[in-house]
Amino acid sequence: MPGINTSMGTSASMKSLLKTEREMLSAMERISSGKRINHAGDDAAGAAISDRMSATIRALDMSVRNAADVLSMAQVAEGALDEHSQALQRIRELSIQAATDILNAEQRVYLQTEVNQLLNEMDRVSRDTTFNEIAVLDGTFADRRFQIGSHEREKAVISIANMRNDMLGAYQASTEHTAGETNLAANVRAGDTAPASLVSANDDFDITGLLGTATIDVNAGNTAADIVELVNDKFDNTGVSATATTTVKLQVNSTAGAMQGTGKVV
């Protein structure tokens, strides 16, 4: 009759060897990875905490990268604004130079030509300054959000004002015209003794300046000088001043041809 002999000592030795092998493999894995927890079985609670911390660290690493991109964009905008500042300083120098009566009209034209070139360059910089194909200084860069933290609420909101020439300055003016109001411009016809240069209908002007907003009432029959006086009366409330300039456009038609010109009435 066959029988099975079992050696209890051998079984105990084998069990001890297997346990030692597992511990050795675990120790080698920790040494090679540098981590105490490599599997959830090593420490379930610790593994959960470790995974959460790892996710936060990776999110912060990406946030640092985002912040670096924002800094690069700001440096691009700063460089363009430096060009604006230099152009404005040069324009101021030219305007002060042109204010002296030592210069004649032709010389002032040369100064104005340089000013126009500087203004065109400022417009070009505002239009063409981009970062990652995104316009920065043309007024479209508004309320842009940048993730700078590991949580959804940790965002930076950045807006950059429109830096075109027609948008620079501290003052703005807006008007509301009455329905049916006619154009203030008038034609001089053959036989006319004087052009019509008066306001033809009542209107309200809202003037917004650095100090605030004020409304002036313009009545039919007011002249440009009257409007200037109304605006300047509100200077303490708005910080806006006005001047009136009279210009005339002459056009003569005949069977022989036509002559057209524009000038200022002195």
Image (cartoon, helix red, strand yellow):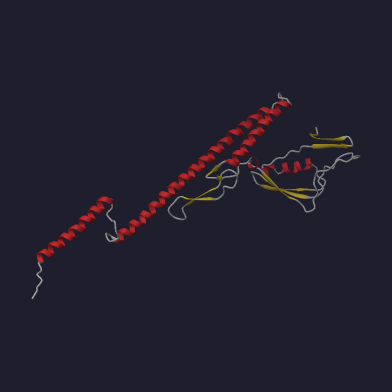
Q: Of all residues shown, which one is farthest toward the top?
A: 102
Closer to the camera in the image, 118 or 20: 20
- As displayed, is residue 13 above or below residue 100? below
Q: Position of residue 229 (x, y in %)?
A: 75, 41
Left or right: residue 81 compared with residue 107: left
- For the N terminus, the image quarter is bottom left
Q: Quadrant of residue 40?
A: bottom left
> Which residue occupies the extreme right position in the image?
191
In the picture shown, does residue 173 fall above or below 256? below
Say whether residue 38 is left or right of residue 202. left
**Quadrant including the C terminus:** top right
Residue 97 screen position, x and y as percent: 66, 27
Residue at position x 9%, y 64% in the image: 9
Q: Residue at x 73, y 26 (%)?
A: 106
Q: Nearer the viewer, residue 199 or 131?
A: 131
The location of residue 181, given as percent across then percent down, is: 79, 50
Residue 69: image location, x then y, percent: 47, 45
Q: Is residue 109 above or below residue 193?
A: above
Q: Is residue 101 left or right of residue 38?
A: right
